[in-house]
Image (cartoon, rainbow, N blue to C red):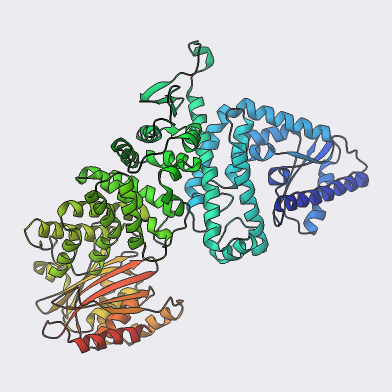
Amino acid sequence: MVDRAEQRRARAEEADALLYLLLSKACDALGVPTEGVALVAVGGYGREELSPYSDLDVMLVHAEGYPQVDELAAQIWYPLWDSRTKLDHSVRTIAQAQEAAAGDVRVALGLLDARHVAGDSHLTLQLRSVLMADWRRTAKTRLPALAEACRDRAHTVGELAHLAEPDLKEAYGGLRDAVVLRALVASWLVDVPHPVVERARLDLLNIRDELHTVAGRSTDRLIADVAKDVAAGLGLSGRDELLRHVYATGRTLAHVCDVSWRRIESLMAKPPRSRRRQRTGGPLLLALDEGVGQHEGEVVLMPDARPERDAALGLRAAAVAADRELVLSPAVCARLATSAAELPDPWPGEARRLFCALLGAGQGLLEVWEAMDQAGYVSRLLPEWDTVRFRPPQSALHRYTVDRHLLETCVAASTMVRDVRRPDLLLVAALLHDLGKAVEGDHSVTGAVIAADVARRLGFTEADADTITLLVRQHLVLAQVATRRDLDDPMTVELMAGIVGDTDTLDLLEALTYADARAAGPAASSPWRMRLVGELSRRVRAELSGGGAALWTEAPPIPVPELHQVVGVGRLGVSVAEHHGDLQVNVAVPDQVGTLSTVAGVLAIERLAVRSAVITSVEGLGISQWTVAGSPPDPVRLRDRLAVALRDDGDLVRRLAARDSSVRKGVPSRVDLLPEASETATVIQVRAHDRPGLLYDVTAALAATGADIRSAHVSTLGAECVDVFYLTDSHGSPLEEEDARVTAKSVLDRLS
């Protein structure tokens, strides 16, 4: 087994020996004494944490009036530069070092780890004593700036526990924050769980060592291209296991940082001792609930509380802390994890109520759940949680690990609890909906099985457990149907009505869909997706209420009375508008087979990514409305390009082919017939890797078969497209069965 810590110390000792020799030779060559001058290692070198390609961070400290100090420094630095050693160097007196530390908090942190290497050890000792005393004396005035710097860094770089390609040093919860925690401890204002922090720090250092070895250079970013080799070097099974390890370590350090900063903020908010009222006795506790109190910004247990007798006490403390956005004391979490009484199966009503209150607390849930999770209390409450802890996201649409995504879904769902009749079912479904991602197969199906067991264990009735199970099983269907089916087709509404069964369940599923999308990220919760989900839900709600499927409430793509505004010479017109936060391009062209593919090709050449398309015919014109992403195009230029392409699309085809040739192909495309989707049209679904001109190729292939596109529903999810087309023949009827198969094969052949 490789002892990487010993390897880091060996690198530091090798650098120490070299610097010792260089200082001795330089002093001899210049005829100056070694008294009054010292080489001091700072930063990571001072902590003896040199990875294979780390810089040497060295300071030459000298007494006031020391002779020829610049010449001495040059004779030390130049041999290092000649050997291509990466060097971060400085030359300072003790007073200058104090001034530098006072002016830059990052310099101050590095100097706190100053370690003697060569020369006058008394000078190094004096430097360390002075800098440490300055830090402790000024900590209360300097820590707010350090806290702000940490927040800015977290905002810019992100959290180590949620990055697909994490920065092991700069991300929040990384090596930089481990250094910050050392500085907080050195201030004597707060203490941290040293074994926990040290273990996490060493884990990250070991990963960085292997990252340097694999990459062959200095880097802190664990990119996907090297992650597999880094995992192999660490004896891990692959990239996913490595990322789970990184996420777990980053989450641990981030949690300790959060708690430490909250305690420091509480300390800073206290009035000076001279103004405090003198009192005697134990700590002042403010009672919040039965057995639960508050002390200095943290929720604690009252002295007479007995978690080993009261099984619901932990949930009560957690719900109170989350509701008030307070910290749940780490000591309390540890006590609950080890000594709290087991909840019976099924849970009593009070425990279930407190659990749902915790899930519905909004942002306060995140830090409280993290504290319980770090201590192991969550695993006692919900053993299934361990299967998704720190699990990397499986889709580019998701910005969080699976466990954090579930919590963020609860936070989003908490804003909609007044929109549904049973908010408790919504919140529990939000927490459980992706638990199936730890199991092979469709996570909606496997998750539904897990959710059914959990719901019954929580004490829900059979009917309520069935509702939670349905929500988990169908948590993706509303968005999928809304973006891939024709909302004007009665079968679309009938399909969804048959799935949900009643309006209460529909309300819950709609709210869960919104919450899941918002927690996933902007790509999943774009305005056009959410608008389509809302419109489909409205129509299904009308159907379930007995009023029949409602008609689309918005105007047609381009209202008939306004056609003259976009139709110009040759019955061709283009307009561009903002609508519900989306960029929309409206096009009117002569209604004939093949024009849709031409429009799609022109939009691709203009670098407009199509999110959705709706097509209709009005007075002999083909009217299409395109929801696109990109810079707003010039409608006049777009119209001119379209006019040229409609006359001769040869140049359009060549330009699309040139752009397409530079794009790496994804997995093979799929084209499926969906006979159950409509009784009035033939429906085909195309799944393909996104690329320039993809929609042009599909629509051109359809045009070549003579099929008429009644409507198109285009969805781009990350790098993948799912496009659904409703096709009819020249008489407006569904295609014959054989014609439908030929059409689907034609599209697949074109994409292949």
Left or right for 528, reference 710: right
Residue found 45% across the figure and 54% down from its top: 387
Q: Position of residue 218 (x, y in %)?
A: 66, 58
Residue 293 sits in which quadrant? top left
Residue 96 on image: x %, y %: 72, 34
The residue at 23%/54% (across/down) is 510
Where does the N terminus fall, quadrant-wise? bottom right
Q: Nearer the viewer, residue 331 or 584?
A: 331
**Closer to the camera in the image, 281 or 515:** 281
Q: Quadrant of the C terminus?
A: bottom left
How many numbered marks does the figure carry? 0
Nearer to the camera, 735 or 659: 735
Q: Quadrant of residue 561?
A: bottom left
Residue 339 in the image: above or below residue 702: above
The residue drawn where x is 75% and y is 32% is 127
Q: Nearer the viewer, residue 333 or 588?
A: 333
In the depicted structure, whether residue 613 falls above or below residue 271: below
Identity of the residue drawn at 52% across and 55% down: 244
Residue 505 appears in the picture as rendered: yes
